[in-house]
């Protein structure tokens, strides 16, 4: 079940990266954000707000990296964005018709934290242990709920998609701060 859901998620992620989406910062309320419904979530909870933001695009709203940070897939290094529109094929140009209605973040502890961290660490041999682990539920206007775990390692972070039937290691991505030359700082893995 997780594999079929992963194909939908990865298809949406890959299409959003390869589709040439132009985006404006939600903070600036640019042209792309005009007409956003009042119930759309435009502000992320802390600490997610440190690394990410909501962008308005012709294909709907997306959770993306904030300026000064880069989200990169561990699988192929591609930029990662999490669209509110989930599609098996090409994303439709629906603008502000697709958005997040809820973004709930909770700190994870105990067995849930241990299990998620073990899945994230597969094949990485992380030298740093995550200081905090967060479970983020992203609810789209379509009713689809996506769960992403975020791992805060201090000077960098990571993320991974975790549907009901378990976290998916193929969905892991790193969140790295960019230096002045806009080159990501690489974590020690």
Image: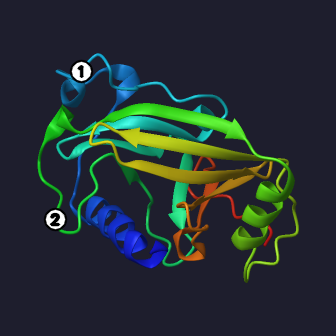
In-front residue for pair 105/25: 105
Single out the residue that lies furthest toward the left: 93
Displayed quadrant of residue 160: bottom right
Lateral position of residue 35 relative to residue 84, left or right: left
Q: Please tell me whether mark 1 sits on a helix, a strand or a loop.
A: loop
Which residue was labeled with disc 1? 37
Single out the residue that lies furthest toward the top: 38
Give the vertical position of 76 relative to 34 (above or below). below
Total numbered labels: 2
In-front residue for pair 160/24: 160
In the rendered image, residue 149, in percent from the top left (x then y), is placed at 63, 53
Which residue was labeled with disc 2? 90
Tag of residue 142? none
The residue at the point 72 percent across, 63 percent down is: 116
Specify the quadrant that holds the C terminus. Answer: bottom right
Lateral position of residue 19 relative to residue 53, left or right: left
Specify the quadrant that holds the N terminus. Answer: bottom left
The residue at the point 53 percent across, 56 percent down is: 71
Single out the residue that lies furthest toward the bottom: 123
In-front residue for pair 157/45: 45
Give the vertical position of 60 relative to 15 (above or below). above
Q: CA distance from mark 1 to mark 2?
A: 24 Å
Q: Please tell me whether mark 2 sits on a helix, a strand or a loop.
A: loop
The residue at the point 23 percent across, 61 percent down is: 87
Give the vertical position of 96 relative to 82 (above or below). above
């Amino acid at each position: 079940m997780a594999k079929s859901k992963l194909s939908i998620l990865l298809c949406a992620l890959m299409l959003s990266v390869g589709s040439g989406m132009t985006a404006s910062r939600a903070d600036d309320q640019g042209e792309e954000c005009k007409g956003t419904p009042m119930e759309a979530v435009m502000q992320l909870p802390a600490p997610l707000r440190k690394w990410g933001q909501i962008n308005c695009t012709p294909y709907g709203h997306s959770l993306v990296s904030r300026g000064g940070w880069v989200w990169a897939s561990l699988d192929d290094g591609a930029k990662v964005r999490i669209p509110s529109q989930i599609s098996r094929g090409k994303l439709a140009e629906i603008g502000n018709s697709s958005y997040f209605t809820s973004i709930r973040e909770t700190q994870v502890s105990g067995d849930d934290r241990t299990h998620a961290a073990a899945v994230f660490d597969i094949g990485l041999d992380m030298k740093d242990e995550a200081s905090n682990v967060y479970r983020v539920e992203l609810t789209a206007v379509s009713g689809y709920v996506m769960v992403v775990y975020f791992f805060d390692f201090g000077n960098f972070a990571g993320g991974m998609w975790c549907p009901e039937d378990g976290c998916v290691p193929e969905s892991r991505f790193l969140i790295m701060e960019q230096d002045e030359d806009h080159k990501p700082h690489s974590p020690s893995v």
